[in-house]
């Protein structure tokens, strides 16, 4: 799902649930998600750019 | 021995030699609570009777020659997110109003074994989801040096209790900065250990992969004492502190200094000068991927918090404070693929910080970009623009919650209006004890006046009564 499509749907859902105050938070979250999707660590299967990283045991 | 030991280390000596009794010290703390807490609102539950009984037992054991160690007979407070058998753990929320803990959290059991006295449970930002302590079912905690300001959060009541002489230390939690932020705002030492050092069972989770438990104290030595007890392995810091000369520290720039209050920037720069004069080698260090730090933190923390609260959000949404409910609801909309991108981003950031620390003993940066914020103000003017207080206060701490590196804040100066400024020191993952030793070396070389005035219980005349 694209960020634009996601944002449209979640804003509609927030409106339906009578939570209009969620709008600025969801818009900020959309910016965060966009930043993550633009990051250079994301896999690109078509171009063979699959980072050889296993999830670190954070504990 | 002076009438009022300032630190746990000093108090422990007085208790061991029976110059003071635990009962007398406990009464002083209870008196401070009775005198001051109507204004500061640090405590949700005061355990006066229980603390007096614990103190009586401690005195009896010490008199019988069974001194357990430096925490024996020392009054401490617990953030009310941490289970203490037989008492409610409210998490500062109406959602938890019927709760009573059936057992001690592991960290509490270890402190109990070390002989600590539990003076009470402290106020916090509801469910630890905030950095100001303003959203609490019990009302906001207030800063002892200016009651119009927040002591920071989420462990705000914990910081107030230590600063105002109501406890000698407090146990807090840190998911994005919630130990270091209030410690810096209140001029205290606050330690976020390496992730996993201190068990989190019996602690109400905020974000299970980011939550840390650690102490808020008046000195690095005290932080080491409490940290050792929390780990179940008593740790005595080296005495005297190892020399600072020869330490190699990286100074983070760019993102980490781009948005600073001028007084904070000045205090940090002065601290750098002092450290260089003490023989510390400082190197400027650049870290990449800083533009993604907040996004990684947000998408992990909110998604994990939403999972914890999903059931009560469905059935008891109105029992949350409005702002906390909205943040939790936001987390419910995060897509799985974006959560996983954030988890991958955490791996990248861990490697970034490990690489930045290569050949260094640690990293230096401010703890908070701003001094304690004004209660009720959602934004703060900084760098010519209005910034959200939440985002600004998390800006310099959240990275190390994400990566799990140990980090400590120590007071390093004051703003022109007298509010404390904190210096953050970051250590290697898995080497929290080495970080404590390093901080103990650095501590004497930061501004002595600020340490003395910020580390002591403030004089009555220091308190704002507005």
Image (tube, grey):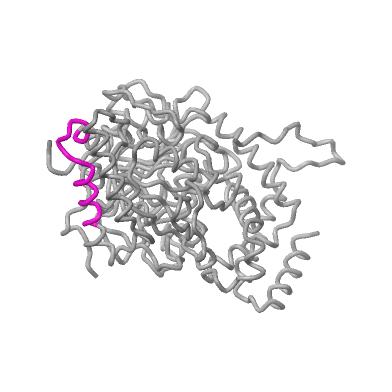
Q: Nearer the viewer, residue B298 or B212?
A: B212
- Locate residue B169, reporting x and y percent: 33, 45
> In what quadrant of the picture does the C terminus of chain B appear?
bottom left
Please identify the residue farthest to the right as the structure is shown: A46
Q: Nearer the viewer, residue B251 or B195?
A: B195
From the image, which quarter does the N terminus of chain B lie in? top left
Quadrant in the rendering for residue B461: bottom left
Q: Report the residue that reaches farthest toward the left.
A: B2
Looking at the image, residue B50 sits to the left or right of residue B175; the answer is left
List x then y, in percent, for residue B349. Answer: 60, 38
In the rendered view, tell whether residue B436 sits above or below residue B212. Answer: above
Q: Nearer the viewer, residue B74 or B319?
A: B74
- Vertical arrangement, residue B145 with respect to residue B429, above or below: below
Q: How many marks?
A: 0
What predominant SS class does the magenta segment belong to? helix
Res B286 seen here:
no
Locate residue B39: give its quadrant: bottom left
Give residue B203's position: percent from left, percent from top.
Answer: 52, 49
- Left or right relative to B347: residue B85: left
Which region of the structure is painted magenta?
B14-32
- Is residue B295 covered in magenta? no
> Quick one: B124 or A53, which is closer to the camera?
B124
Decide: is B95 above or below B32.
below
Location of residue B241 in the rendering, given as x and y in whole percent from the top left corner: 29, 25
- Say whether residue B99 is visible: yes
- Would residue B392 appear left or right of A21 to someone viewing this image? left
């Amino acid at each position: 799902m694209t960020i634009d499509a996601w944002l449209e749907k979640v804003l509609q859902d927030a409106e339906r649930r009578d939570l209009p105050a969620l709008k600025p938070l969801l818009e900020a979250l959309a910016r965060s998600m966009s930043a993550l999707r633009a990051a250079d660590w994301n896999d690109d299967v078509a171009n063979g750019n699959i980072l050889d990283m296993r999830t670190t045991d954070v504990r | 021995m002076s009438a009022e030991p300032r630190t746990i280390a000093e108090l422990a000596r007085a208790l061991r030699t029976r110059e003071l009794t635990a009962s007398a010290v406990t009464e002083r703390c209870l008196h401070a609570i009775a005198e001051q807490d109507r204004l500061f609102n640090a405590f949700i539950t005061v355990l006066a009777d229980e603390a007096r009984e614990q103190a009586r037992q401690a005195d009896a054991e010490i008199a019988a020659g069974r001194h357990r160690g430096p925490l024996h007979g020392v009054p401490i407070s617990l953030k009310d997110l941490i289970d203490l058998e037989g008492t409610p753990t409210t998490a500062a929320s109406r959602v938890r109003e019927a709760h009573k803990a059936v057992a001690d959290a592991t960290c509490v059991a270890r402190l109990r074994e070390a002989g600590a006295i539990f003076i009470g449970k402290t106020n916090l930002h509801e469910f630890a989801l905030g950095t100001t302590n303003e959203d609490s079912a019990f009302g906001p905690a207030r800063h002892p040096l200016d009651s119009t300001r927040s002591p920071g959060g989420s462990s705000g009541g914990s910081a107030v209790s230590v600063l105002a002489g109501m406890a000698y230390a407090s146990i807090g939690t840190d998911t994005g900065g919630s130990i270091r932020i209030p410690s810096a705002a209140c001029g205290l030492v606050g330690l976020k250990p390496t992730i996993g050092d201190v068990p989190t069972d019996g602690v109400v989770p905020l974000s299970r992969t980011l939550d840390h438990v650690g102490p808020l104290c008046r000195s690095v030595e005290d932080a080491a004492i409490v940290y050792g007890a929390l780990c179940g392995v008593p740790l005595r810091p080296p005495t005297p502190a190892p020399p600072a000369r020869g330490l190699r520290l990286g100074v983070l720039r760019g993102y980490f200094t781009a948005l600073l209050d001028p007084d904070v920037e000045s205090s940090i720069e002065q601290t750098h000068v002092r450290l260089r004069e003490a023989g510390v080698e400082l190197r400027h260090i650049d870290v990449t991927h800083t533009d993604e730090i907040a996004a990684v933190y947000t998408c992990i923390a909110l998604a994990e918090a939403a999972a914890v609260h999903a059931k009560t959000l469905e059935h008891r949404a109105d029992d949350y404070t409005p702002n906390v409910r909205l943040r939790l609801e936001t987390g419910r909309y995060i897509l799985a693929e974006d959560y996983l991108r954030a988890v991958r981003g955490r791996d990248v950031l861990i490697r970034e910080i490990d690489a930045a620390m290569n050949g260094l003993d640690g990293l230096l940066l401010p703890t908070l970009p701003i001094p304690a914020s004004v209660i009720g103000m959602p934004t703060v003017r900084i760098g010519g623009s209005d910034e959200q207080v939440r985002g600004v206060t998390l800006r310099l701490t959240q990275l190390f919650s994400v990566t799990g590196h140990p980090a400590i804040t120590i007071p390093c100066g004051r703003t022109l209006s007298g509010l404390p400024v904190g210096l953050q020191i970051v250590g290697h993952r898995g080497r929290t004890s080495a970080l404590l030793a390093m901080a103990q070396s650095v501590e004497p070389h930061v501004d002595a006046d600020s340490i003395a005035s910020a580390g002591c219980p403030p004089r009555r005349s220091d308190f704002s009564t507005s």
